[in-house]
Image (tube, helix red, strand yellow):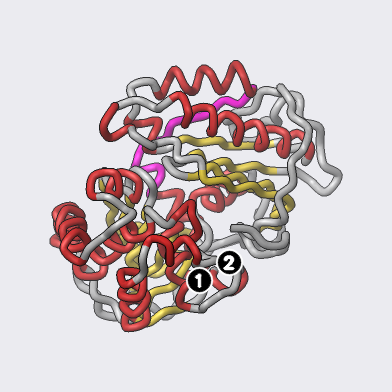
Amino acid sequence: MSGEAGEIPGLDPAIDRAPLSRARWGRRSPGRPDVGFGSDRGGATYAALDLGTNNCRLLVARATRDGFRVVDAFSRIIRLGEGVTSSGRLSDAAIVRAVEALRVCGAKMRNRGVTRSRLIATEACRAAGNGLEFLDRVRDQVGIELEIVDRETEARLAATGCTPLVDPLARGVILFDIGGGSSELVRLGPCEPTQYGGPPHPAIQGWTSMPIGVVTLAERHGGVTVTRETFETMIAEVAVHVNRFAAEHGGTDGIHMLGTSGTVTTIAGVYLDLPRYERRRVDGCWMSDEQVTGVVERLLAMTYEGRVANPCIGAERADLVLAGCAILEAIRRAFPCPRLRVADRGLREGMLVQMMREDGVWQ
């Protein structure tokens, strides 16, 4: 999913391949430039990379008065966590796909003169028995130092990245991030204004991470042919985890839902009947509870071939989208809200904001 570069955090420019490089990149302490990167005349250039269970995504950005401007981006579905649920290991084929995507990310960072970066890996590497071996291979073959983050960090980064889309008049928000191998739920209070500028701070009142994502759920229950019975079975499995969180952080008076992930952006694209995915129309759009239900029912009625043919789903998501809908449905049943706001932003934007705050760019 890509668009044009601009002032909106997370806006992906057109993706083009660049020459490969072998410079080493990884997390650096606040304010310390990355050796071997070159400086940009307009100030520090930041990179945030999220290597997830399903996707490899990169943003390169420079700070502005109230946020940041994206200057380059990359996104590719790699299915790194494919088969991890059954085997407990990252497969050779998945590793090859991930390494190739990371080579492209490395080249983009070098070409853009990145001076500060954070490069994270999430659930697939947390769960796989050979996750650390994979990180060593990436370091040796690509020159990228990946950091495996815990689930709390993942939830906090997602919240930080999505706060600009919180309705300032709402009493609170239920934020959800449906990933490939895990899904996070965060209860947010009204956002805290910043003293010097930049995006608002998230007011986290509670969070949980569920060891269920679209890849793991689809592998257990099937994603090509999904009957109503199978769909309800998936919902019930997720509900066990969601309901525990809802028991402590329930109550939806005056709050709205805020969703980030391929599932919710796909639902928005289908709802808008887009002839091709357009981030400008999806990011920040509102959907009513009835509209979300209508799209889910429409997807359930589609054949696998019909989902493949939909320009906002395609072959890469056709066997995963209903698993994502099941996770969303479990969340919606536990937290019935009249409105859902869609975010095509999340972890990468959260990393960028965090690094820029650490560097005092808005002070």
Under circle 1, the secondary element is: helix
132 relative to 220 in the view: left or right: right
Magenta stretch containing residue 134, yes or no?
Answer: no
Work out whether residue 318 or residue 175 is closer to the camera in this orientation and state it.
318
| Residue 249: image location, x then y, percent | 21, 62
Q: Which residues are magenta?
A: 143-155
The residue beneath circle 1 is 269
At 59% from the left and 73% from the top, the residue drawn is: 275
Residue drawn at 42 percent across, 40 percent down: 53
Judged left or right of residue 23, residue 120 is: left
> Which of the two labelled residues, at mark 2 and mark 1, occupies the earlier sequence position?
1
Distance from label 2 to label 1 (Cα)? 6 Å
Discs 2, 1 touching: Cβ within 8 Å? yes
Residue 179 in the image, given as x and y percentages of width and height: 38, 50
> Mark on residue 253?
none
Residue 285 place in picture, x, y as percent: 50, 76
Residue 276 shows up from this direction: yes
**Neighbour tally class for label 2: few under 14, some 14-19, many 20 plus, Cα within 10 Å:** many
The residue indicated by pointer 2 is 277
Quarter residue 292 falls in:
bottom left
Residue 150 colored in magenta in the image: yes
Amino acid on which disc 1 is placed: Gly
The answer to whether residue 261 is above or below residue 267 is above
